[in-house]
Image (cartoon, rainbow, N blue to C red):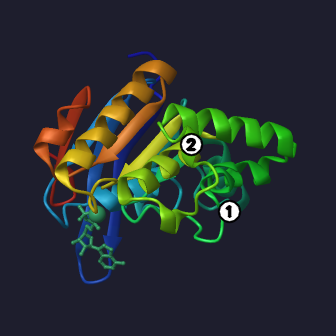
Amino acid sequence: MSIPLLETRALSRHYPGGVRALDEVDLRIGKGEFVAIVGRSGSGKSTFLNIVGGLDAPSGGSVSIHGRMLDYSDRRALIAFRRQMVGFVFQQFNLIPSLTASENVEYPLLFNYRPPAERQEKARQLLAMVGLGDRASHYPGQLSGGEQQRVAIARALVADSPLILADEPTGNLDSQTSEGIFSLLQRLNRERQVTLLVVTHERELASYADRTVEMRDGRVVA
Ligand SMILES: Nc1ncnc2c1ncn2[C@@H]1O[C@H](COP(=O)(O)OP(=O)(O)O)[C@@H](O)[C@H]1O
Ligand SMILES: [Mg+2]
């Protein structure tokens, strides 16, 4: 691997009372990789994703993106990093209920000052790509869980962020819908070369990824 897209060194996150949510994690992820993170509840998966995505700060160690170390003490740089580099997908979808599917997908572009016509066209293309071309004007409440998660995936891609982080994206979905979401992620990874870091506790779903990383007690064990 040349310069990895993402590299962590001795990444740690401690909480008062001696909890080591992350304990010196070293991980390298290449551009265009689809990596599944598995491990029991409490093993540090969310903590890892949140720190890598700039939503939380480590107690020790470092995170580098394209060879550049993130500075967690620089709030503005961290916000810019999240907007430009990271797309998030959450277990609860986190769509804005008062906005249509299309408006939800466009939303991150409001902060990039793109003109409305460009935003709308981009949302249209992405919704078509996730198989929801005919649902653009539906509100989240009018969509199934699987459809809502597809909208959220389109939203995560809209700013062309090179890194997509998904924390248990199918945790609220039935197994057949979950397979559909993972096969969509796999297709997006192959067609758009986005780097995907996806937490799941289901082994069968992890098989859609190129590589599986297993966490236990805040450490990477495999
Ligand atoms: N805000 C917090 N305060 C104290 N302990 C926490 C906090 N957040 C997470 N932890 C602990 O850190 C460990 C890892 O949590 P988490 O990253 O959420 O695990 P996972 O996502 O794998 O289920 C757990 O032991 C959890 O209890
Ligand atoms: Mg978690």
Is residue 68 visible to us here? no
Tell me the CA gap for discs 1 and 2.
Answer: 39 Å
Identity, as a three-letter code, of the amino acid under mark 2: Asp
The residue closer to the viewer here, 127 or 51, is 127
The residue closer to the viewer here, 134 or 112, is 134
Residue at 40%, 36% (x, y): give it. Answer: 196
Number of the front mark, 1 or 2: 2
Q: Which residue is mark 2?
A: 134
Residue at 40%, 66% (x, y): give it. Answer: 92
Q: Is residue 86 left or right of residue 30?
A: right
Residue at 75%, 42% (x, y): give it. Answer: 120
Q: Is residue 54 left or right of residue 10?
A: right
Residue at 12%, 40% (x, y): give it. Answer: 204
Q: Outermost residue toward the bottom?
A: 17
The residue closer to the viewer here, 21 or 99, is 99
Is residue 11 visible to us here? yes
Residue 145 at x, y percent in the picture? 37, 59
Q: Is residue 187 above or below residue 216?
A: above
Q: Is residue 74 left or right of residue 118?
A: left
Q: Which residue is mark 1?
A: 75
Identity, as a three-letter code, of the amino acid under mark 1: Arg
